[in-house]
Amino acid sequence: MSRLRFGIFLAPFHPAGENPTTALQRDLELVAHLDRLDYDEAWIGEHHSAGSEIIASPEIFIAAAAERTKRIKLGTGVTSISYHNPLWVAERMVLLDHLTRGRVMLGCGPGSLPTDSMMLGLDPTATRELLAENLDIIMRLLHGETVTATTRTHTLVDARLHLRPYSEPLFDVAVAAVASPTGPKQAGTHGIGLLSIGATLSPDGFDALAHHWGVVEERAEANGTTVSRADWRLVGLMHVAETREQAYADVQFGIEQWFRYFQKTAAFPQMAVEGGDVKEMIDFINEAGIGAIGTVEDARKQVQKLWDQSGGFGAMLLLAHEWANPEATKRSYELIAQHVFPHFQGGQVTHAQATLGAKERAAGKREDYAAAQLQAVATMTERYQQEVSAKG
């Protein structure tokens, strides 16, 4: 297994009615915490309505987070490019690429909340059509082309970037996929990465994983582009603690408000989560195959299951949530870094296999080595006594 990267997908999800200023600071602190724990990536969402996913500009958030971190890569997860002038999307990302010295990633999507797009007079069909148009323009600009184009929302005349990206040849670009083949088709067409969001957040999406990558490869072949599973990122749900009982107790802090948001507020049918009380909610996550609430062993099994179902991917992104209080949430990320990462990183022999193998070899020879150690002590003691006697 090649080195599996780990990261988060930060929408974020905060209960409506609480202090947004302190909630945003928690988000920045979380990204800094993950940077210290050696997480590879953090993807930041864009939303403009419904009162829960409160980051309106992932680019501004990334600029702030970049000053608080050292190595973690920061992506827009995603920029709702149907809402924006594609020239300005490309310009802002190139600027961020320079400011972060190559730590930025561009995630693209049509926008997931209808309450966002309706304010711009766009329906869900229009946003998906604009996704294809604008993504094509953005990729052409990022590759150095001069573009003249007219979409239903913007006109570009001899548009070009006046800066080249800092990254050579280009920073990572990925397109979001929920349940339909729209995202995979665009990823294959342009030879870019795929962000499978809903594909791991519902039973139907989980079943579509292998099919989605098949669409990517088919479109890549048809368009003469190159794609890699290393650029495929899966988003999943997890919360772990030292014991399963502790994990269940932890999530009682906030899992219900998260479920109610998708059940009663967000018009996002791909996230049709089930569960009437907390126990049913926990059971839904664990039994539907879409996540893991429990121990590090449960988390490892979930990652392996996703790997087997998909045929392999490049990064496991944990959907950031506040099911547990801030301390328990941070501890969950720590446990995953400490006990899950090593089983999926290190190459043909993972870090976990290397240290466990060394332990097993040492244990198998312990009695022989212990006897040799005792004999060495006895030999050196006898030699010393002989030296003292000779001098006397």
Image (tube, helix red, strand yellow):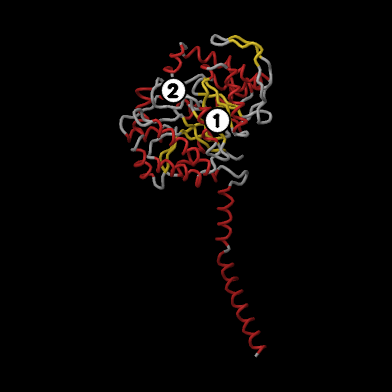
The reply to whether the C-beta atoms of the residues labelled 1 and 2 are less than 8 Å apart is no
Marks 1 and 2, the one that precedes in the sequence: 1
Q: Residue lying farthest left? A: 277
Distance Cα–Cα, label 1 vs label 2: 23 Å
How crowded is the residue under tag 1: few (<14 C-alpha within 10 Å), some, or many (20+)? many
Is 126 situated above or below 356?
A: above
Please identify the quadrant where the N terminus is shown.
top right
- Residue where numbered disc 2 is placed: 270
Pick the residue in front: 202 or 40: 40
Quadrant of the frame with the C terminus: bottom right
Measured from the top left, where is residue 112 in percent x and y? 46, 21
Q: Is residue 1 visible?
A: no
Q: Is residue 296 visible?
A: yes
Q: Quadrant of residue 245?
A: top left
Q: Nearer the viewer, residue 310 or 54?
A: 54
Q: The disc labelled 1 sits on which kind of residue?
A: Gly
Q: Position of residue 188 (x, y in %)?
A: 61, 22
Q: Position of residue 288 (x, y in %)?
A: 41, 31
